[in-house]
Amino acid sequence: MSVSTPKSGDHSHPTKSSISRGPRSGTPVSVWEIVELARHPERPYALDYIRRLAPDFVELHGDRLSADDPAIVGGVGSWHGRTTMFIGHQKGRTLKERVARNWGMMHPEGYRKAIRLAKHAAKFGFPIVSLIDTPGAYPGAGAEERGIASAIAIAIMEWFRIPVPILAAVIGEGGSGGALGMGVADRVLMLENSIYSVASPEAAASIVWRDNTRKVEAAEQLQITSREIHAMGVVEEVIPEPKGSARADYDGAARALDEALQRNLQPLLVLPTEELLQRRYDRFRYIDSLVRAEPQFGPKID
Amino acid sequence: MSIVEREHGVAIAGGELPLILLPTNCPGCGIALEREKMRAQNYVCDCGHHFRLGADVWIPIVADEGTFQERWADVRSHDLLKWIVPKRYEAVVDELLAEGLNESVRTGTCTLDGRAIWLAAFDFGFVGGTLSIVAGERLARGMEQAASTHTPYVLVTASGGARMQEGVLALMQMAKVNAAVGALHAAGVPFFSVLTDPTFGGTAASLALLADINIAEPNAAIGFTGPRVIKQATYADLPPGFQSADFQLAHGQVDMVVPRTELRPLLAHLLELYS
């Protein structure tokens, strides 16, 4: 399923758009309920999907510079007969594991690890699947000391030069630059109850009102649900989740993700490398083309 | 006078700077400020305090007088998210335009000591210098043209990050401009970045630190996450000088920390070395 783009003018007032409908249940789901589903501690994480997509998955570690960042996992496995590089944010399931994995918030070493694995995939011509699920990059002093800003910047720039097909899917939280650092791909998909945001609702509320308890209002204003992001032309497709959301049916959610990723991979496999990279460049260079096509929707560009 | 300036005889500014509003006393040393005197020394106090400048001042500092040809000035931000808190985004933009500001990034071509360059300057006065669709478009287009004409690119940053009021499309500008930075590098075009106070968030984590040479202004705060958020998130006490220009120099993120009065002669020298 792909959610159709609303006509211009359909971008209603946020208080109206705060109600969107779940496709199966038919009951209204508020924006904040979607945020809670995206962050639910029982929601499947990257490894839950990767081990279903590629049961023979072999995990690889380390940035080859100084460390291994457990907030991001990566490795190779056979996916529909093709060796594929899987990379994904991994939040922990138990408290101990959450601490070890830093709640899926990457340090600079994580972005360096991801690019190291991407170059590894490029050497062997393996396609890359990136599963995004992070509140954001780690907002701590150590990350600053070790260059988190330039680590993200370099990762974003490097993804444009990786000469193999890249598919990204937001499976939970797509938080800010920390998510985009793993989100430069040829196709970007979102699971239905995932979110993608320039700033977390809490951070936005803190900036707008200096009060992070007004996160619900901020979430509605920011337009972060999969439908809203798709309507802006930022992702190619929204992947429907099983009844009761992904956490109710890991296998069903993995099947839906598998099908959508495979279908989106096929046209990329036949593209010459130069064209693949040019299209990736154009995808992001003109990502606001919907804005340009409908001037009332965004800035006028001469 | 610096060594570079003596050798090259390059003025500290390309033209006469506009007079800007300054506090009565310097926040660095407390002396009463004379506007004309401050203007003559690029708005740097004798004590070394660097005042924040808008794009309207940065352009005449860098560009040879009368050479700046602004491009794509006639575009503006529109309210795609119907943003209403704490104030309508459209109204915010209207007011800033009425004040004479023109988005968070202005760009165009000029010469510096006679050499052709592309120049882009952030303006912190426009919604905190935030990366917006218009800013991203001006940056990406300029970089693409600099790449195709093999013209050195000079960037001056001052930004809080991506603009919230444009939602995820503002976030996407980081990828858009980094694609263009990649094109600039692939074309072998020199790219010099001048990081001024403050440079944070999505701007620091996209083009600002990706130059061939990163030059920070003294005491400029540069980082990804702001100190207030770091303290909220980690309860950490941050040491004095955390995220300062010298901190970033010590941590390998910038090549040098250069006073504003020595910047232009330095850029002229670099343009010669990389020509």
Image (cartoon, rainbow, N blue to C red):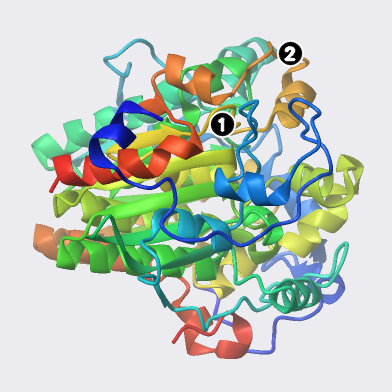
**Of the numbered discs in the image, which one, if any, rests on residue B236?**
2
User: Residue A173: x, y in percent?
Assistant: 61, 44
B98 with respect to B65 (left or right)? right
Q: Secondary structure at mark 2?
A: loop
User: Residue A250: x, y in percent?
Assistant: 55, 41
Residue at image position (86%, 57%) is A217
Residue at image position (70%, 81%) is A11
Give the camera-side residue of A25 and B97: B97
A24 with respect to A138 (left or right)? right
Q: Secondary structure at mark 1?
A: loop
Badge 1 density bin: few <14, some 14–19, many ≥20, Cα 10 Å: many
Amino acid type at mark 1: Gly
User: Which quarter of the picture shows residue B223?
Assistant: top right
User: Residue B264: x, y in percent?
Assistant: 38, 45
Badge 2 density bin: few <14, some 14–19, many ≥20, Cα 10 Å: few
Count the marks: how many?
Answer: 2
**Of the numbered discs in the image, which one, if any, rests on residue B223?**
1
Q: Earlier in the sequence, mark 2 or mark 1?
A: 1
User: Residue A176: x, y in percent?
Assistant: 58, 46
Residue A250 shows in this picture: no
From the viewer's perspective, is residue B33 above or below residue B96? above
Give the camera-side residue of B53 and B90: B53
Give the camera-side residue of A40 and B134: B134
Residue at image position (84%, 76%) is A16
Asked if badges 2 and 1 are on one and the same chain, I answer yes
Residue at image position (18%, 31%) is A120
Chain to which mark 2 belongs: B
Amino acid type at mark 2: Ala
